[in-house]
Image (cartoon, rainbow, N blue to C red):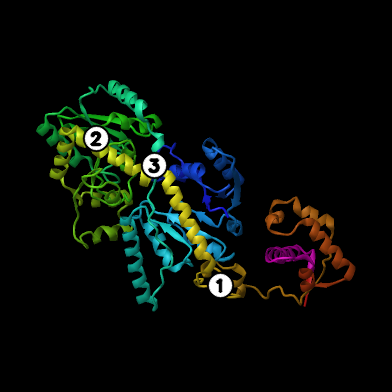
Amino acid sequence: MDITAAVLYNKEGYHTGGKKLLGRHSAGEGFLKSLVQHGTADSLYCCADSATTFKEFCSHIQPWLQKPRKVRWIPMERPDLLSQPGTIYRPDPVLSQMVWARRFVDQRAYSVCGVTHTIGTKYIMEAIGDLITAPMQPWDALICTSAAVKTAVEGVMREWSEYLAQRNGGKPEILVKFPVIPLGVDCSAFPQGVEAVNSRRQLRQELGISPEDIVVLFVGRLTFSAKAHPVPMYIALERASQQTKAKIHLVQAGWIEDPREEPDFKNSAQIFCPSVNAIFLDGRQPEIRKNIWSAADIFISLSDNIQESFGLTPIEAMANGLPAIVSDWNGYKESVRHEIDGFRIPTLIPPPESCLDLALNYLDGSLNWPTYMGHTSLATAVDIDACTLALCQLIENPELRKRMGENARQRAREIYDWKVVIAAYEQLWQELAEIRQGAPESAPLKPGKPPYPLGDDPFRVLGNYATRSLSNEMMLSLGAIATPELLRELQTIWFTNFGQDRRISVNIQIEILDAIEQKGAVSVGEVLRRYTKNDQELASLYRTLLYLVKFGILVISC
């Protein structure tokens, strides 16, 4: 059996060519490219909302297809077809709607698998909380990209569970799995060997950097609130410049998200590290994103915000053989080994309950997400002295840079290369399939009960609105105006033909009318027995009969 997952696709989640380049875009595109190139299944499955979106998916993956693969479309309105791949993969943690939809089909039919990126927003926190109340199963998984994220997610769910137990009695059971699988990087996509040497020479010439100068590289969005406040980095670089007497160039390859921050980034560099040549490049340009690593000697990223959860750029730096100086923060704690691949710089935050006012104002909307992040960023300190020491050690010791860079390159290939990561995904999907075969089902659907109580059949929820409901004993006879011509006429008017795709075909409708005309009257039950084979046809026929009654083509008698 193929081990794979249908990819829930919309271009925004898997595309790096937009005006805003976020980490989740790079991760999504990297995942999709690697699933196409390194996945072992014969077929690729795309779950999309339309044939147009599926066509876009096919166009998106076409350059990556290295061997013949069947590419199959699963329409979003047909979750029953997800039993073919066995798993659906969504590139975020918002899983509750998907598992409720599965309950309309068969809870054992397939697994639902998501992945974390930023987890601090209200939207994502609510989605994580929904995993407690939604019908999650032991064969579902939310992939955490780092152990730090897993700890945070489990903590939120534990607190929410305790609240629900206090509110409603009983303790909700957490069934969804939280495997830790990192994001990946295509190690082969960056310049290697002679190409890297030539790229380094060319870029340094273009930027006016001498071969013996030191280049410290930051890659990522240039925003103090959502990536890294630059001033502690600037201060540490200036101190390192004074202590080592080295000519240092700081290349910041990214893009400034908020125009208000552009003068602050550039002016503060002149104020806090005047001895350092600060160079700003547009990191959204593919050639810069690919080649700028070759020009550098040291990578630096002092992330200090609650938006970051994993951090792709350190492992991209590792894949390029650069020693990394990173803050001891979130996923950086796991990717960069201190004093082996680089240095992790200590961080300091306030004790719990120091920011409850911020949490309240973010909840009530008086603080938006960027402002909320900004306040927490300014309350997070990165050890400038430790950063200065790390910079000095790497600047003054080329052998240390080389050794740490080679350690980092090897680690990236062994742990973070997409080939390795996709294999971990496939192993997870296999484990979920095995669990799905035998584990007890959580909250099995009882006959006659709604699959989703807050989204039930409107005619069950609102059944008391009507005088009565259609029943098998009711008799159907032709109305005074029942003719095939009138039925055809109804098709020509938009608002009388509306919804035809959810009713039985007009030809079958005419066949039913002919049968009723021959007998004079036919019971609803007899029509249902004759013209339905499954529940979907049954639902369509019920609606069709009421449609014909609505326009006087059929009449009902008890």
Q: In which quarter of the image is residue 67?
A: top right
User: Above or below — where is 194 with respect to 511?
Assistant: above
Q: Closer to the observer: label 2 or label 1?
A: 2
Q: How far apart are marks 3 and 2 (CA)?
A: 21 Å
Callout 1: helix, strand or loop? loop
Q: Distance between the residues labelled 3 and 1?
A: 42 Å
Percent across and percent down for residue 12 are 47, 44
Q: Closer to the observer: label 3 or label 1?
A: 3
Q: Write down the residue under mark 1.
A: 445
Q: Write down the residue under mark 2.
A: 402
Percent across and percent down for residue 229 are 23, 43
Quadrant containing the N terminus in the rendered view? bottom right
Q: Quadrant of residue 392?
A: top left
Q: Which amino acid does label 2 sit on?
A: Lys
Mark yes or no: residue 508 visible.
yes
Q: In this view, does 457 lie to the left or right of 172?
A: right
Q: Nearer the viewer, residue 458 or 373?
A: 373
Residue 469 is covered by the magenta coloring: no
**Which span is picked out in magenta?**
530-554
Callout 3: helix, strand or loop? loop
Q: Write down the residue under mark 3.
A: 185
Residue 540 is covered by the magenta coloring: yes
User: Above or below — where is 369 with respect to 21?
Assistant: below
Q: How far apart are marks 2 and 1 (CA)?
A: 60 Å
Q: Which residue: 34% across, 25% down?
A: 199
Q: Which residue: 57% across, 41% down?
A: 58
Q: Residue furthest right?
A: 518
Percent across and percent down for residue 419 are 44, 44
Q: What residue type is labelled 1?
A: Leu
Q: Residues within 10 Å of mark 2 (few under 14, many from 20)?
A: some
Mark yes or no: residue 260 visible.
no
Q: Which residue lies furthest to the left in this view?
A: 243
